[in-house]
Amino acid sequence: MIIQFKKPLNQEILKDILNTMKQEHHHGILVDNHLVVFDIDSFDFNERQKSVIDRIEQHQPRYVLSSRAFKSDDTIIKTAHNEIGGNNFTVMAGPCSVENEEMIHRLAAEVKAAGATVLRGGAFKPRTSPYDFQGLGVNGLKYLREAADENGLDVITEVMSVAEIESVGQYTDIFQIGARNMQNYELLKAVGRTHKPVALKRGLSATIDELLNAAEYIASEGNFNIMLVERGIRSFDGTYTRNVLDVGAVPVLHKLTHFPVIIDPSHAAGHADLVAPLAYAGVAAGAQGLLIEVHQDPARALSDAAQQLTPAQFTKLVDHVNKIRAIDHEDELEAAEKSVYQQDSDSANNNG
Ligand code: PEP
Ligand code: MN
């Protein structure tokens, strides 16, 4: 049961309600003006208690803090250069891995010119084989930060373990939790104890409910700066696509959660020529941002060579995405015009 209190909170009656719950051995948490009580879906409040209650939601999902039932308006994450979520659209781009200083500086300028406002790049890489390039570590983080600052961009980079949170946190604006770590609960709790934004990638075989419960681990520690990243799930046919981009997950997540939803078409596609069509589908479905891998010379990339776009391909993709977004925006404008027209005719009728 979610109890939403009227604002400003009446501390005295609130205390009384909390005491009543405690006496009856009900387990709950209080966040802002919401009290979540886990083990009941109704309660016989007295009149005085009722007077401070705005709304009661009887049934709540296990991922309560992440749910729309708990918070109906979109979460907007503020960083130095961005507001992510709501009606904003955020393009994050850069190489799979930071390979050297010069490449990340050049790419930062190029993705910025194309419209990106967040620079991505892995410095600690989760590779399928221990013999593959594992990233430049802290040096990679330094290059990434400097390149982003030089171009007025935010940084997103992966953190793979609890032990790395402090050092990665010194360089990044957004922690990326990779698909392979989506259910690393200690890591989720630890980034939850920071207040830094977290981009949580959907696990390779995770259901939507599992993704939301993973987000809940972060939120339950007090960090609500969470964005969810759909990056494709594994299916039976990996012949032509690396993963299957779950486009339907975008509207479903919008219904279930207030957190922003970002599409990563690069890891879903696995092939450069499929990145743009998947990005367009995700944007048309309502994604609030894109995470795209871009490399100057994809064929020579030290990781994910097949799926990275050249800066020119990326520029074209962003231009098309803006056109798709403009179509959606036209609908909004039309609706706004209609409502103005309606108001005009209402007032004309009233006057008449
Ligand atoms: C990445 O972003 O480079 C990456 C490894 O992503 P994922 O965790 O989605 O595979
Ligand atoms: Mn990659």
Image (tube, rainbow, N blue to C red):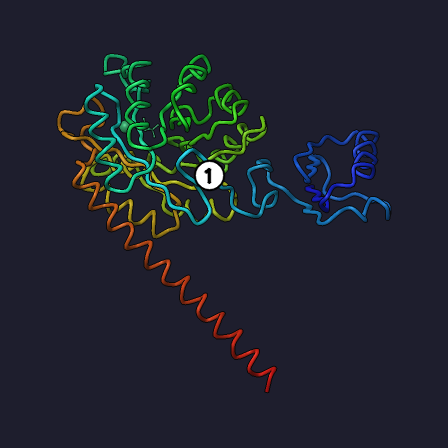
Quadrant containing ligand 1? top left
**Residue at image location 39% in from the left, 36% down from the top:** 81
Which quadrant of the view contains residue 175? Answer: top left
**Residue at image location 26% in from the left, 46% down from the top:** 318
Classed neighbour count for the residue bearing mark 1: other residues with Cα under 10 Å, few (<14), some (14–19), many (≥20): some
Is residue 227 depicted above or below 252 in this figure?
above
Q: Is residue 218 left or right of residue 2?
A: left
Residue 61, given in percent of the width and then of the height, sits at 60, 40
Residue 35, given in percent of the width and then of the height, sits at 70, 37
Which quadrant of the view contains residue 167? Answer: top left
Residue 321, given in percent of the width and then of the height, sits at 28, 49
Q: Is residue 284 left or right of residue 87?
A: left
Return the residue at label 1: 208
Which corner quadrant holds the N terminus?
top right
Residue 160, given in percent of the width and then of the height, sits at 39, 19
Which corner quadrant holds the C terminus?
bottom right
Under mark 1, the amino acid is: Ile
> Foreground residue, 104 or 58?
104
**Residue at image location 51% in from the left, 20% down from the top:** 190
> Foreground residue, 335 or 190?
335
